[in-house]
Image (tube, grey):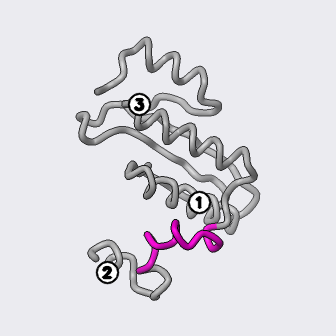
Amino acid sequence: MALSEIQLTEALSALNGWTLRHNELVLEHEIEDFSAAIRLVNSVAVLAEEAEHHPDIDIRWRMVTFALCTHSAGLRITELDISMAAKINSVISSGGGIDVTTSEKRMDNFDWYRRGVGVRDGLRR
């Protein structure tokens, strides 16, 4: 269920750095370098897979942009988006990422990646 304007305003006040843009929650986060940006995205990917809720992600050298809305709610913002935004903030505040190579359970979702399968092939499996 989509959040009301009041719920959305309250949620945004608790989400450091997030803004509302075109019916999406958006965070633009500058990080130290491109490698760190990739590590951050990899960390968020693991959490998104676990939650089965995936942000749109754009990487531009040191700038990573996350955008969240819920497709099944008519591209509106729901509690799923607020929860994922909080998880992304947690990853960022903990230093930009978790070590995805140390968690076999989490990496099971990326088996196609470990096998060296291309992204398109991996997503079709």
Which badge, 2 or 1, comes first in the chain's sequence? 1
Residue topped by disc 3? 79
- Magenta residues (range): 100-112
Which badge, 3 or 2, comes first in the chain's sequence? 3
Q: CA distance from mark 3 to mark 2?
A: 31 Å
Packing grade of label 3 (10 A; few <14, some 14-19, many >=20) is: some
Q: Quadrant of residue 103?
A: bottom right
Residue topped by disc 1? 43
Is residue 125 positioned above or below 96 on the image? below
Left or right, residue 52 beside residue 36: left
Mark 2 is on which residue type?
Asp
Q: CA distance from mark 2 to mark 1?
A: 21 Å
Is residue 55 positioned above or below 12 on the image? below
Q: In the depicted view, which residue is nearer to us: 36 or 114? A: 114
Q: In the depicted view, which residue is nearer to us: 51 or 11? A: 51
Q: Residue at 63% of width from left, 53% of height from top?
A: 63
Mark 3 is on which residue type?
Glu
Q: Which mark is residue 121?
A: 2
Packing grade of label 1 (10 A; few <14, some 14-19, many >=20) is: many
Mark 1 is on which residue type?
Ser
Q: Residue at 39% of width from left, 76% of height from top?
A: 119
Which element is circle 1 on?
Answer: helix
Which element is circle 2 on?
Answer: helix
